[in-house]
């Protein structure tokens, strides 16, 4: 019998889980000929999320696995941890807040049965505030135009992938990255299913502006040299203008004995070039500290315990 795993990262979702877990369990009756495996990854939640998950795991030990990380490593690392534990022939990913419709997995699984190794649910629209939608649309537009050509306009974090892709992600284990962009970057031709993302009805989102900005920077540093190349071009242009202006001042002073004046222009040039240099150093710093982070070789996540039908273990299964 084939198996289908669903990975669910969990972070402060105690209000959502009593609804989310039963809805995912109900999918088992829809997947004829498949064994359903639910892998919940507790990413260092400080509420009752883990307690609720363990209660469900005790009731459905053959279906539910609970992965407890030692601390909060971030949603991307939590998904990667889930991938190392999931054993399905294909693996899906869905958020714990039920903004994505779990029943869409049925259509995804049908495409997988026909040979498609990657099926993405693309957010055609979202029931969210205007500013949040604007931020998301701008982000995905920039990714599509400057980082990963052809990337879906609405983006995706609700998907189904083949075991082969899971094995590639587990092998790469890249840090400070956008996992969904990495999956797309691998080059497996996906099927894209449009849907409308629902508004969150319970709990408070932990997807803060700071985390969004980090994801934005991670995506552009990991998948394109556009930022640093742009600054190189700007630096070259500014250097040419500076040399030209310097030559102009020198010639006027030497041939026409014109007194060089202009405290205001001088200060404008100094402040502009200084600000530009600081920006360049900041961009270089982003690349450098990520390189340092990779060289250190620290793991993306640390699994404390895995709760499944066989009991409690501290080591995920090996690929």
Image (spheres, helix red, strand yellow):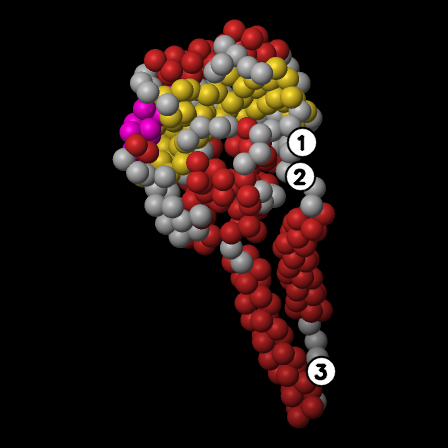
- Label 2 neighbour load within 10 Å: few <14, some 14-19, many 20+: few
In the rendered image, the residue lying farthest to the front is 1
> Secondary structure under badge 1?
loop
The tag earlier along the polypeptide, 3 or 1, is 3
Q: Position of residue 295 (x, y in %)?
A: 69, 51
The stretch drawn in magenta includes residue 103: yes
Magenta span: helix, strand or loop, mainly? helix
Residue on which the image places disc 1: 302
Q: Is residue 232 visible?
A: yes
* Residue 310 numbered mark, or none: none
- Which residue is at 70% across, 79% downward? 260
**Along the line of sight, the residue nearer the viewer: 23 or 283:** 23
Which image quadrant for residue 89?
top left
Instruction: State the quadrant of the N terminus.
Output: top left
Q: Is residue 299 left or right of residue 237?
A: right
Label 1 vs label 2: CA separation? 7 Å
- Label 1 neighbour load within 10 Å: few <14, some 14-19, many 20+: some
């Amino acid at each position: 019998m084939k198996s289908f795993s669903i990975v669910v990262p969990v972070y402060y979702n105690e209000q959502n889980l009593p609804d989310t877990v039963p809805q995912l369990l109900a999918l088992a009756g829809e997947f004829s000929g498949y064994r359903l495996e639910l892998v919940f990854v507790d990413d260092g939640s400080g509420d009752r999320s883990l307690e609720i998950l363990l209660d469900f795991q005790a009731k459905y030990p053959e279906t539910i696995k609970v992965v407890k990380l030692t601390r909060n490593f971030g949603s991307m690392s939590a998904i990667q941890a889930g991938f190392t534990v999931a054993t399905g022939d294909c693996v899906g990913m869905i958020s714990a807040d039920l903004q994505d419709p779990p029943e869409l997995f049925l259509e995804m699984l049908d495409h997988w049965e026909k040979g498609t190794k990657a099926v993405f649910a693309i957010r055609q629209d979202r029931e969210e505030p205007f500013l949040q939608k604007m931020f998301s649309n701008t982000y995905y537009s920039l990714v599509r135009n400057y980082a990963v050509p052809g990337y879906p306009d609405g983006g995706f974090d609700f998907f189904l992938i083949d075991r082969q892709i899971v094995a590639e992600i587990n092998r790469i284990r890249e840090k400070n990255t956008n996992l969904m962009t990495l999956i797309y970057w691998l080059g497996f031709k996906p099927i894209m299913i449009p849907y409308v993302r629902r508004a969150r009805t319970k709990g408070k989102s932990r997807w803060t502006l700071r985390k969004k900005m980090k994801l934005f920077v991670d995506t552009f540093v990991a998948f394109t040299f556009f930022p640093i190349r742009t600054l190189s071009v700007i630096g070259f242009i500014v250097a040419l203008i500076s040399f030209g202006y310097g030559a102009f001042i020198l010639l006027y002073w030497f041939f026409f004995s014109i007194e060089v004046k202009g405290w205001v222009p001088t200060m404008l040039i100094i402040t502009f070039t200084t600000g530009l240099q600081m920006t360049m150093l900041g961009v270089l710093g982003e690349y450098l500290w990520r390189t340092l982070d990779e060289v250190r070789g620290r793991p993306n996540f640390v699994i404390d315990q895995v709760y499944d039908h066989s009991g409690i273990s501290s080591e995920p299964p090996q690929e």
